[in-house]
Structures are given as C-alpha cells and as structure tokens.
Amino acid sequence: MKTHSGAKKRFNVTGKGKVKYKKPGQRHLLTGDSGNQNRMARKPIIVAKTDMKTMRKVMPYSF
C-alpha cells in the first residue's frame, strides 16, 4: 500500500514512533485570535493513541 501524499507532507515520525504535526490556523487572519491562542498554535502536537491505527494505514513505511 502506498503512503498517502498529503500525510507524508504534514506528519513526522519521532524516534520513539510517535507522530508529530503542526497545528493549523497560523497562515493568515490572525488578528482576531488572542495572543495565547497564537502561542499555543506554534507548538507541535503529538497524534493521540486512538488515531495511531489510521496513521499506520496512511504512512505504512514510516514506522
């Protein structure tokens, strides 16, 4: 099965096998958000354990 093209651009696998991605909403129209929202969106986030089955399906060769 092939790796999903959109997934390989958006997700990275860490050394321990967790999947990391950048939060959306940081390109434009940021003036309406609070400073706290913008700071929190800058930090990368780890995919939840419940979604790992899906991640293994779309990125089979990354694990």
Image: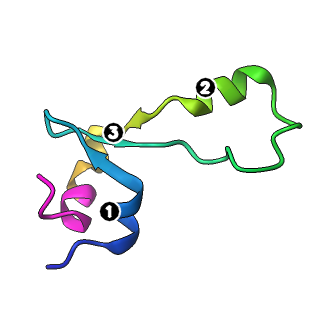
Mark 2 and mark 3: Cα distance apart in space: 17 Å
Q: Which residue is mark 2?
A: 40
**Mark 1 or 3, closer to the camera:** 1
Q: Which residue is mark 1?
A: 8
Q: What range of the chain is rendered magenta?
A: 54-63
Q: For the point 60% across and 33% down, which residue is it?
A: 41
Residue flagged by tag 2: what amino acid is it? Answer: Met
Q: Which residue is mark 3?
A: 48
Q: Position of residue 5 (x, y in %)?
A: 35, 73
Q: Find the residue positioned furthest to the top.
A: 36
- Mark 3 neighbour class, 10 Å CA radius: few under 14, some 14 to 19, many 20 or more: few
Q: For the point 88% across and 37% down, which residue is it?
A: 32
Q: For the point 81% across and 40% down, which residue is it?
A: 30
**Mark 1 or 2, closer to the camera:** 1
In terms of sequence position, does the residue under pointer 1 or pointer 2 come before the other?
A: 1
Mark 1 and mark 3: Cα distance apart in space: 17 Å
- Mark 2 neighbour class, 10 Å CA radius: few under 14, some 14 to 19, many 20 or more: few
In terms of sequence position, does the residue under pointer 2 or pointer 3 come before the other?
A: 2
Residue flagged by tag 1: what amino acid is it? Answer: Lys
**Mark 3: secondary structure:** loop
In terms of sequence position, does the residue under pointer 1 or pointer 3 come before the other?
A: 1
Horizontally, residue 23 falls left or right of residue 59, namely right
**Coloring scheme of the render?**
rainbow
Q: Position of residue 38 (x, y in %)?
A: 70, 29
**Where 62 sits versus 3, above or below?**
above
**Where 52 sits versus 3, above or below?**
above
Q: Position of residue 52 (x, y in %)?
A: 24, 49
**Mark 1: secondary structure:** helix
Q: Find the residue positioned furthest to the right.
A: 32
- Mark 1 neighbour class, 10 Å CA radius: few under 14, some 14 to 19, many 20 or more: few
Q: Position of residue 7 (x, y in %)?
A: 36, 63
Mark 1 and mark 2: Cα distance apart in space: 23 Å
